[in-house]
Amino acid sequence: MLAGGAGTQYIETIKHSTLRDDTACTGADDISLTGRDEMSAFVMAETQAMMEQLGGSYCTTYYRSGVGYVANSIGANGQPTPDGDVRFQFIVGEAKLRAR
């Protein structure tokens, strides 16, 4: 939520990628958001700024690592994305949330 915002807002990010060899490549025009509220505008502006810093597009390679996967993204300018490698796992079946 943004400071002074109107409460919780949900954003769905839609990214269309083109497969090139073993990578999924995405340009600035390939990203859109479903929301039209203040948080959606903020997220889109930040996404566009990141894309500009990366040279207008980036490509992601996905590979297995242990029991999970890693996504490694490199911009058109050769620099890695600010988040670096992202580790994740696919959840098969129903996911159950729990508080810690």
Image (cartoon, rainbow, N blue to C red):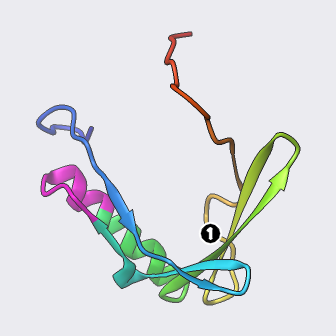
> Residue visible at 40% across and 74% down?
49
Please tell me which residue lies in front, 97 or 95. Answer: 95
In the image: residue 63, left or right of residue 98? right
Q: Callout 1, which amino acid?
A: Thr
Please tell me which residue lies in front, 16 or 27. Answer: 16
> Residue visible at 29% across and 69% down?
32
Packing grade of label 1 (10 A; few <14, some 14-19, many >=20) is some
Q: Residue 91, relative to residue 94: is it above or below?
A: below
Q: Residue 34, relative to residue 73: is it above or below?
A: above
Question: Magenta stretch: residue 71 in it?
Answer: no
Residue 14 horizontal/vertical position (percent): 35, 64
Question: Magenta stretch: residue 35 in it?
Answer: yes
Residue labelled with disc 1:
81
In the image: residue 25, left or right of residue 40? right
Q: Residue 34, relative to residue 45: is it above or below?
A: above
Q: Which residues are magenta?
A: 33-43
Q: Quadrant of residue 42?
A: bottom left
Q: If the image is split into quadrants, where does the C terminus sit?
A: top right
Looking at the rendered structure, the secondary structure element under dot 1 is: loop
> Residue visible at 72% across and 87% down?
21
Q: Quadrant of residue 81?
A: bottom right
Please tell me which residue lies in front, 8 or 67. Answer: 67
> Residue visible at 38% across and 79% down?
30
Residue 17 horizontal/vertical position (percent): 49, 77
Q: If the image is split into quadrants, where does the N terminus sit?
A: top left
